[in-house]
Amino acid sequence: MRPHPGVWSRPSRPILALGLVGASFFALPFVALLAKAPWSSLPEFVRDDDVQSALSLSIITSLITTFLAVVFGIPLAWVLARSEIPGRRWLRALCTLSMVLPPVVGGVALFLALGRRGIVGGPLFAAFGVSLPFTTSAVVVAQLFVAMPFLVLTVEAALRSLDPAKEEAARTLGGSNWYVFRRVTMPSIQPAAVSGLVLTWARALGEFGATITFAGSFPGTTRTVPLATYLALENDLDQAILLSLLLVGVSFGVLVGLRDRWIGVAFGGGP
Amino acid sequence: MSLQVEIGVDLGDFSLAAAFTVERGETVALVGSNGAGKSTVLRAIAGLQPVDRGLIAFDGTVWDDPSIGTFVAPERRRVGVVFQQYLLFDHLSALDNVAFGLRARGVAAGEARRTAVDLLAAFDISGIAAQKPATLSGGQAQRVALARALAIEPDVLLLDEPLAALDVAARGAVRRDLDARLDQTHAARIVVTHDPVDAYALADRVIVLEHGCVTQSGTMFDLASAPRTSYVAELLGTNLIRGVLRGDLLVTAVGAELVVGAHDLADGEALASVRPQAISLHRERPEGSPRNVWRAEILNIDRSVDRIRVRLGSPFALVAEVTPSGLAVLERDVGDYVWVSVKASEVNLSAM
């Protein structure tokens, strides 16, 4: 929303100065990344096997995560928004806890639940010999744990603001619950769902803490771009900078692509 | 062949208890003030509000009866609903809105679209088939909503304030159009309204709902002649005369003429309303200014509320309201003739 033109559109100098300090605080790191970027080693960077495998692993795992988030997250959002189960508020808090939790804590918790000696992972290993940690699947599990709340919250907010009268109208026309959900509910919340989807994907792509704790950092199987960036910092600063720029570019693209409107929808803000 | 409604619904501290039947091919107006329970009745019939007590059945098939644990889901009743705000699906074209019910009931896409195309043509709105609801006028949206409800060939058709969303200028034409289209359907029809003109023009019969109870039912003339509550007397107990307007004369189907007050309507079909209080009864032919004077037989005298209503015979079926002392002075009873006068300025017109 444009600020209302008038006396408040020209802030006083102290406010302006402090605001600009805040803005430059955000701008400076990116300026530094761009300034220090070793553009001459870019061709070599692009051809690098480690970079390529980290990149393709990141893309594949984050897309699988996004897909799984849709499959489980949209029904979960529907339950949180529409059902009248007891303790729904606690359930919502639980389902969004991982957004504010340090990701490394999430990784530890996943390890205790799904690790080879975990409360679910233990019996699973005993029965089928399946062990989840330190596999590509573990990368997806870690990403899903941290990223799915973005989709759940956006879709839940959209479902809450949707007037159920249109769904009722569809029922009277002969639509079953499922038909009405597909043909009326989903199209109505589509902008919010898309925005939640993209945010979820971006969060999954940038996931670090839970991944390195639960899945480790094995080249080709669990070393995603954020992990590769952290490791490159030790021995190849140039590569770390270029990997960082790659992630910055993707994130920035997501924000520009969604624009204010969809972010507003996502967090119940907007004009 | 009828819709049977005998329901009790509790919503917080509001309680509804209503019983009535509607035949196939009949239009019933459900009239009442805000909060009387009209919408709750419609929602119960459509299956959007399960009832707490009683029964809803159509042609002997039970749709809702908590005592035997029967509840038929809304999508399995054949009830077409035209909602007050129309509730068209914004993301679908007018054509796909009309085809929605058929698709939902498993009709193949091609066939559903062909039926919808035919319906839009029958409603004279083929030109807007591809348009989204946001681009339609109120009258067009109303027709799409009606076509969408009729596409499923409903057994019961419910219309919730179908004209309320329209501006006054569009209302007359849409009302006439709606009346003609309702007559072509074979469904049992219920129109919720609080406009006596709508009830008179669209419905065969009126059911009055007040504070969750049916207080009276009958034809508009029945209600005007013998209102049982002051709500009926004040809102619905007005005289409505259908005729053809020629200048300042309204000519009825039997050729009787009524001089009307100042108006800006074009010649053509019109509806005149005359308040019962505006009709004067006299023993002798009155002198003076009234331009409408005639003799009529007293058919009935009703003293049911705190007022007396006198029902008059031809040439106009009218109801006059008089005070007890006025009736005493008149010295006339049922079967006698009286002189009737109405000032032209008391005859109010609306377009049909």
Image (cartoon, coloured by chain):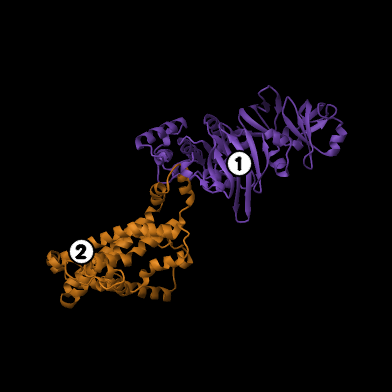
Task: Give the chain letter for purple.
Answer: B
Residue B268 seen by the camera = yes
Cα gap from disc 1 to disc 2, whole angstroms: 63 Å
Q: Position of residue B143 (x, y in %)?
A: 49, 37
The extreme top residue here reads B255
| Disc ID at residue A57 | 2
- Please determine whether, in this image, residue B16 is positioned above or below residue B240: below
Q: Residue at x 44, y 59 (%)?
A: A81
Q: Position of residue B304 (x, y in %)?
A: 77, 40
**Element type at marker 2?**
helix
- Please determine whether, in this image, residue B92 is positioned above or below residue B173: below
The extreme bottom residue here reads A234
Amino acid type assigned to the residue bearing label 1 in the image: Thr
Looking at the rendering, in which quadrant would you find the C terminus of chain A?
bottom left
Task: Give the chain letter for orange.
Answer: A
Front-most of residues A30 and A15: A30
| Disc ID at residue B193 | 1
Q: Position of residue B37 (x, y in %)?
A: 61, 47
Looking at the rendering, in which quadrant would you find the N terminus of chain A?
bottom left
Front-most of residues A29 and A184: A184
- Please determine whether, in this image, residue B77 is positioned above or below residue A229: above
Residue B274 seen by the camera = no
**Element type at marker 1?**
strand
Amino acid type assigned to the residue bearing label 2 in the image: Leu
Q: Quadrant of residue B235?
A: top right
Q: Position of residue B28 (x, y in %)?
A: 60, 36
